[in-house]
Amino acid sequence: DDRTHLPYCEAVVREALRIDTLVPSGIPHVATADTELAGFQIPKGTLIINGLDYINHQEDVFPEPHTFRPERFLSDDGQQQQLALEHDRSVPFGAGKRVCAGES
């Protein structure tokens, strides 16, 4: 896989997908059961929209969120940061089991 040998190229792709979110509101989901999340009650059948544009531009997660900086995805030595999925805060296509149609 060439991607592991091209860390800056991979970082550029990830930053491009982060800064210009392709699907700003994400793909809508519906709660399949009554759920509580962070103290909020979400009834079964509630339409849930991720708000990806907001997620990808949070200043506390991505400093200078409107500045194109691929380096944010690289470690100090210029290598691609190996982020486990649960720690990867970049969500260009959404979240959950159906995060990306290309991964299905």
Image (cartoon, grey):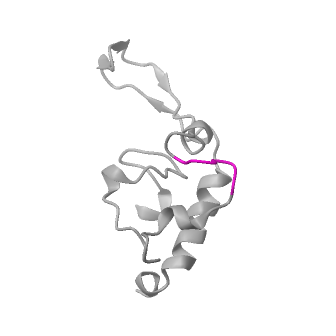
Count how many numbered circles sit on residues in the image: 0
Please give the name of the residue rendered at 38% of the width and 44% of the height, measured from the top-left corner.
96
Q: Is residue 15 left or right of residue 77?
A: right
Please give the name of the residue rendered at 57% of the width and 47% of the height, measured from the top-left corner.
63
**Main SS class of the magenta portion in the image:** loop
Q: Measuring from the top left, give residue 68's x and y in whole percent.
A: 67, 60
Where is 76 relative to 26, above or below? below
Q: Quadrant of residue 9?
A: bottom right
Q: Nearer the viewer, residue 44 or 78?
A: 78
Q: Measuring from the top left, give residue 8's x and y in whole percent.
A: 54, 77
Which residues are the magenta region?
62-67
Q: Is residue 17 left or right of residue 47?
A: right
Quadrant of the image for the N terminus? bottom left
Q: Measuring from the top left, give residue 78's x and y in whole percent.
A: 47, 77
Where is 63 relative to 81, above or below? above
Q: Residue furthest front?
A: 76
Q: Quadrant of residue 31?
A: top left
Please give the name of the residue rendered at 49% of the width and 64% of the height, measured from the top-left corner.
73
Please give the name of the residue rendered at 41% of the width and 49% of the height, measured from the top-left corner.
98
Quadrant of the image for the C terminus? bottom left
Where is 13 relative to 56, above or below? below
Query: Was residue 78 drawn as part of the magenta stretch in this picture?
Result: no
Q: Measuring from the top left, give residue 77's x and y in whole percent.
A: 42, 77
Q: Is residue 33 left or right of residue 69?
A: left
Query: Was residue 65 drawn as part of the magenta stretch in this picture?
Result: yes
